[in-house]
Amino acid sequence: MIYLTFLCALALSGIAAYYSVIGLAAIFTGAFWPIVFMGGVLEASKLVTASWLYRNWKTCPLLLKTYLTTAVIVLMMITSMGIFGFLAKAHIDSTLDAGANNVEVKTLNQQEKITKDRLDYLLARAKDPSTANNRLDKQIQDTQKELTEISKKKLPLLKESNKLVAEVGPIKYVGDLVYGSDDDNALDKAVRLVIMLIMVVFDPLAVLLLIAANMSLKPPPGKPIVKDGEITGLTASDIPVFTETKPDNKIEVEKENIAEFEKAQPIVLDEASGETMPPLSAGVRTKVLEPKYDYNAEFAFREKGK
C-alpha cells in the first residue's frame, strides 16, 4: 500500500507538473523553454520541500518552517493556475472551429435571407402582366440558382457544427442544468466550473498523497525497526527512564501471626545452621519477620533426646 501511495502521488505530481508547465508556457509565449525548465524545477522542489517539512516539522526553526510552508502553498497555487490555463486553452482550441463555422453559417443565413427577399420581390413582379418580361424571368432563375448554391455551402458547415455540438454535448447539458438553457454563455461557464473543480483537487491531492506516503514509512511511536542488526526508529521519548526509589517496607500484618521489629540487620535464613544474608541495601530500613515458633527450644529438645 505504501508503494501504491507513492506511485499515485508521483503520477499525479508528474501530470500536474506537465499541465502546469504547458499552461504557464502558453501564458508566457515569449519564453517557452525557460518557463518549461523553471516550472519543472519548481515542481520537483515543491515535492521535496513538502516531504522534508513533514519529516523535520518538530526540529525545524519557526522562521524556516513558515517560509517553506508558504512557499509550498504558493507553488500549489501557481501549479493550479497553470492547470487552469492548459485546460482552458484546450477548450478554446476545441471550440475554435465551431466558432468559425458559426460565423460562416450566420453569413450564409444573411445572404440566404436577402436572396429569398429578392426572389419574392421578383415573383411578385412576374405576377403583374405590366411588368412581366423575359428579363425578369432570367433574374428569377438566377436568384433561384443563387439560393441553391447557398444551401450547398451551408450543408457541410451545418454537419461540422452538429459534430462539434455532439462532442461538447455532455458539458453543454451541464451548463444548461446549472445556468439554464436561456444563458448564451452557459457552455463557457460550465467549462470554467469543471476546470476549477479539477484545479482544486489535482495538485493538492498529489502533495497530500506524498505526505501520506511519508507517514506510512514512519514507524509507529515506540516500535523499533531492525535492519542489518541495528535498531532504528526509536526516539528519546520512546526509551524508558529507570529511577531508583526506596521501597516502602511498611507491611501491615496481624500481630498474632508474626512478631516484627525494624532495624538494619542481616536476614536469618536458617536458625539452626546460622546461615544469614546481608541487608537488602545499606541505609534502607528493613523488616525482619520472625514467626513465634521457638527454634531454640526445639533444637535443645532434640539435643536432649540424643
Image (cartoon, rainbow, N blue to C red):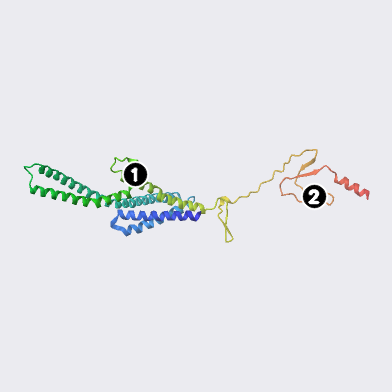
| Residue under the point 79% across and 51% down | 276
- Residue 100 appears in the picture as rendered: no
| Residue under the point 22% across and 49% down | 105
Depth order, front residue of 23/284: 23
Q: Nearer the viewer, mark 2 or mark 1?
A: 1
Q: Which residue is mark 2?
A: 269
Q: Is residue 220 left or right of residue 132?
A: right
Q: Secondary structure at mark 2?
A: strand
Which disc number belongs to residue 173? 1
Residue 103 lies, in percent from the top left, at: 23, 49
| Residue under the point 26% across and 50% down | 158
Residue 4 lies, in percent from the top left, at: 48, 55
Depth order, front residue of 7/101: 101
Q: Identify the residue at the far bottom of this view.
A: 228
Residue type indicated by callout 2: Leu
Depth order, front residue of 279/130: 130
Question: Dot 2, crowdedness within 10 Å: few (<14), some or many (≥20)?
Answer: few
For marks 2 and 1, give the CA distance. Answer: 97 Å
